[in-house]
Image: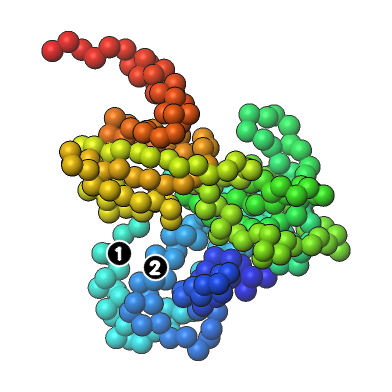
Amino acid sequence: MWRTLVDELGLRIARDGRRKVASLPVEDPEWTPDLEGLVAIKFADAAMEAFRGSDVHARWRELADRAVLTASERARGKFELLRSALVYVRGPHTDLGPVRDSLTEIIDGLACRHRVRLLYRKNGASDWEPCDVEPWSLVLHAGSLYLLAPRRGQDQPKLWKLESVRRCERLKGDTYEYPSAYRFDGARHFERFIGVWTSDLLPVDVVLRFVGRIRDYVEATTWHPTERKTRLEDGGVEVRLTVALTPDLDRWVMGFGEECRVVEPPELATRISARLRPAADQYGSPPAG
């Protein structure tokens, strides 16, 4: 079970589709981390915060602590000098809640290709609903854990936010057929979107224009693999990317405020305008002078 999870999180040398992902072989008892390895473990802890309180987090700490103890005295000494200088600023995160005690059920279901029964509550709902799902991927994004899984007998997967799960149970012996690599690739599934989303929306060409002090930040930052940037004659930066028009895209664009303008498509510009005007109205007119 743990090996499958480590593969999912990319914490060792693993094959991800056609790529090889180099990372932390913490399971290897012969691995002796050097200074760079100790720094990598320190920052890998940040990703594991999403699992805090679960058996998964406890197992990670056991493996990481063992790896640190096997490092040479020289590497550990240098690391101790560096420790206070290695800072992880924790961003938005959510508490796993009750599901932390049965997270292993989801991981075992994914590893063994067994369906999982979730007791789930939709946003805004008051009742918990039992749902039988077929796990495809465990997804970590922006401090939250999601399960990407279709309901029993359905083809289209949906995202289940794990803090909205009260309880889960692996249905032993109730197997399903995991989709082929041609049909589904966990990493590529989200390439059509900004953030995590799942739908049959097709990607479209989006053009954004950035002005003001944010320009250098925009040029130095990559948000999506399809983006292309151009410095304009007026000093602004134009960003082109190909993504689906989802609410996450709306929120991302609005986060730049007046320093970002939607050029294309008109549908997205209209949506952003319709959401920003009521937001501005809440603050009334700016004071005179």
Which quadrant would the C terminus be assigned to in this image? top left
- The amino acid sitting under disc 2 is Lys
Q: Which mark is residue 42?
A: 2
Q: How is the image coloured?
A: rainbow
Q: Secondary structure at mark 1?
A: loop
- Give percent across and percent down for residue 84: 27, 64
Q: Residue at x 52, y 53 (%)?
A: 191
Q: Which residue is mark 1?
A: 86
Where 234 sits versus 108, above or below? Answer: above
Q: Secondary structure at mark 2?
A: helix
Figure quadrant of residue 280: top left
Quarter the N terminus occupies: bottom right
Whether tag 2 and tag 1 are in contact, CB under 8 A, the answer is: yes
Residue 142 versus residue 51: which sits nearer the camera?
A: 142
Residue type, mark 1 in image: Leu
Label 2 Cα crowd, 10 Å radius (few <14 / some 14-19 / many 20+): some
Of the residues under marks 2 and 1, which one precedes in the sequence?
Answer: 2
Q: Which label sits on residue 63?
A: none
Q: 198 or 226, which is in the foreground?
A: 226
- Judge from the rendering whether residue 130 lies leftward or rightward of residue 148; answer left or right: right
Q: Is residue 135 above or below residue 121?
A: below
**Direction from residue 152 to residue 242 in the image, left or right:** left
Say if residue 201 shows up in the picture. Answer: yes
Q: Position of residue 275 (x, y in %)?
A: 44, 23
In which image quadrant can residue 201 be found? top right
Residue at image location 29% in from the left, 30% down from the top: 258
